[in-house]
Amino acid sequence: MSVQQHQGFVQPARRVAYEVIAAVRESDAYANLLLPTRIQRAALSTADAALATELTYGTLRMQGYYDLVIAEAAGRPVSAIDPAILDVLRLGAHQLLATRVATHAAVNESVELARQVGSRAATGFTNGVLRTISRSTPEEWRERVLAGAGSADDRLAAEHSHPVWVVRAFRQSLRLEGREDELEDLLIADNAAPRVNMVALPGITTAEETAGLGRPNEYSPVGFMLAGGDPVHLVTDHDGRIRVQDEGSQLAALTLSRARPITPGERWLDLCAGPGGKAALLAAEARAGGAELVANELVPARATLVRRALSAVPGTVPVWELDGTRIAVNHSEEFDRILLDAPCTGLGALRRRPEARWRKLPRDVAELSDLQSGLIDAALGALKPGGLLAYVTCSPHIAESRGIVATALKKWGDRVRAVDTAAVVQGFSGTPLDLPGDGTSVQLWPHRHGTDAMFITLLERTA
């Protein structure tokens, strides 16, 4: 195809990728929610859907690194480039530096995208920058970018495309485990596409239904790794009884439900239940043991998602829409088990939500820590004497995880005790987990366990 014939054409997969990347920037869209919708709307083939997925996630993951390359190639900071054109350049840089896409296709279609979203001058600028990038190998660009880095953390942040403050937070958390030397492995894992894990709701899904769909999870006894195919159809075909859920999330819910035998009549609470994946698993576990679950979610739209997730479980699970920080006011010492999957920065799920690393700032941690402290205090107040609380975050940041638990233990004194959480998890895990530390907390990691970086701690109200 000549350049003249090519003019005006942008392959559908690239167009979808650009639209999602632009929506992430313009309206804080979530790529993992928007991309499947755009793929379906564009009626992409399986191959084009795979390309759009790779272009979208690859560009978002490596955005920080590509910005350093673009700034060097353009001779100006990326802050001086029109945001829409910068999105085009990022997408083009990803194709040139990290895929097998032909150079002429990456450049020509990027120039056409620039023509459609920018000015006439922007097309020439885009062409010049991308051709400059194409003249050097990926390894040459890596050396050039890293030569400009200052400290060791700056170098890691540049090469692996994480904000420096996130790199430092990960380093601190790993250091507590005596595993600081794993930092680069963690950053590499954050930039790898995660495997697709499914959960088969126990007591509701039969072994025959899951036969041949994949191999059992390494740790969770109620899930499996999808062998292939579209998980959306699998969920739909089984009315949500089989659903997509990271193995770390499965372990978090099971830590509460399997910490001790269930006494029929127990009342359980999922305090921050949206969007409902853990609530569905807890509801199935509660049903099997004769317990009752209540789900709570303050945000109405997320409460709707919780109700939809719970519809897969026979029976009725009440869904409240209450302020979790005030749950103990009218429900003091009411529940035998409570899951507090606290709102957090989500730094443990950057594989699945790569754009989150660019959205969060250190000040967000401080704001969320205040909320997390309020929620754990309220949850302990709503717990019966002898009851169990599982405090969970999808963030390994110390201020959101160990720090919150330490503060709660200090505040509640001898009214609350830490449980050997690691022993509980090892007790139901299919394979022993590598869990350094004293056992009072479990920190999962993408590079070590293949899960999101879930933090789990069990606390007990003393009788």
Image (cartoon, rainbow, N blue to C red):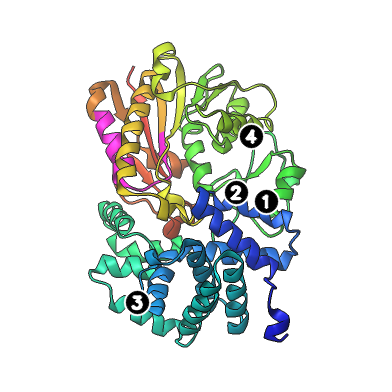
Residue 106 on image: x %, y %:
59, 77
Q: CA distance from mark 3 to mark 1?
A: 35 Å
Mark number displayed over residue 33: 2
Q: Nearer the viewer, mark 4 or mark 1?
A: 1
Residue 4 on image: x %, y %:
70, 84
Q: CA distance from mark 1 to mark 2?
A: 7 Å
Q: CA distance from mark 4 to mark 1?
A: 19 Å
Residue holding disc 4: 309
Q: Is residue 217 visible?
A: no
Q: Are marks 3 and 1 in contact (CB under 8 Å)?
A: no
The residues colored magenta run 391-409
Q: Amino acid at mark 2?
A: Leu
Q: Amino acid at mark 3?
A: Val
Residue 310 on image: x %, y %:
64, 30
Q: Are marks 2 and 3 in contact (CB under 8 Å)?
A: no
Residue at 44%, 60% in the rendered image: 190
Is residue 339 found inside the magenta-colored segment of the image? Answer: no
Is residue 404 found inside the magenta-colored segment of the image? Answer: yes
Q: Nearer the viewer, mark 4 or mark 3?
A: 3
Judged left or right of residue 451, residue 147 is left
Q: Are marks 2 and 4 in contact (CB under 8 Å)?
A: no
Q: CA distance from mark 4 to mark 3?
A: 45 Å
Crowd around label 1: few <14 · some 14–19 · many ≥20 (10 Å)? some
Residue at 67%, 33% in the rendered image: 203
Name which of mark 4 and mark 3 comes first in the sequence: 3
Mark number displayed over residue 37: 1
Residue holding disc 3: 145
Q: Amino acid at mark 1?
A: Thr
Crowd around label 4: few <14 · some 14–19 · many ≥20 (10 Å)? many
